[in-house]
Amino acid sequence: AFPLPHLHGHARVSGLPSSRKSRRRLAHRLSVNSRLNETTAALNVLAAGGPRRGDDPYAGETPQADSICSVPRSAQRAVLLRIREAISADPAPSVSPSGEAALGELLRSGGGCYGGAR
């Protein structure tokens, strides 16, 4: 099933929707697609053996798709749908903590294998 394809990060419409509700739905869909692409890029790197210094997860021969429905392989469609469901159920935070703050929060939570990094 790897590499998983990336979805196009822009709307393929002749013009922007005229109603505010339609523009909001489009912005939400593009935001979900962006998070889906970040997730699939990480999974593709892991499937290829892990990150290497200087690698760009979006570089290379990653297939592109207009939508999940246009992905040719059913296994890839199923994986992308599952990732999209998870992303939709867990909306992005409005403000992301800095790297230092995120690490501190992880260490305070008793994050299992990170306990030795104190």
Image (spheres, helix red, strand yellow):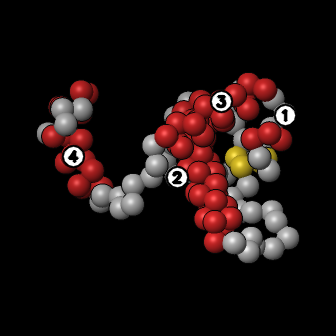
Amino acid on which the number 3 mark rests in the picture: Val
Picture quadrant where residue 26 is located = bottom right
User: Is there any visible trace of residue 42 in the rendered image?
Assistant: no
Report the residue at 35% width, 58% height from top: 96
Provide residue 79's location: percent of width, then percent of height. 65, 30
Provide residue 87's location: percent of width, then percent of height. 52, 42
Report the residue at 23% width, 55% height from top: 101
Q: Earlier in the sequence, mark 4 or mark 2?
A: 2
Q: Cα distance, mark 4 to mark 3?
A: 30 Å
Report the residue at 64% width, 59% height from top: 25
Q: Quadrant of the N terminus?
A: top right
Q: Residues within 10 Å of mark 3 (few under 14, many from 20)?
A: some
Q: Earlier in the sequence, mark 4 or mark 3?
A: 3
Picture quadrant where residue 49 is located = top right
Q: Earlier in the sequence, mark 3 or mark 1?
A: 1
- Which one is in front, 74 or 58? 74
Amino acid on which the number 1 mark rests in the picture: Pro
Q: Earlier in the sequence, mark 3 or mark 2?
A: 2
Q: Nearer the viewer, mark 3 or mark 2?
A: 3
Q: Earlier in the sequence, mark 1 or mark 4?
A: 1
Residue picked out by circle 4: 105
Mark 4 vs 3: CB contact within 8 A: no
Provide residue 103's location: percent of width, then percent of height. 25, 47
Residue picked out by circle 3: 79
Q: Is residue 62 left or right of residue 31?
A: right
Q: Residues within 10 Å of mark 1 (few under 14, many from 20)?
A: few
- State the mark number for residue 72: 1
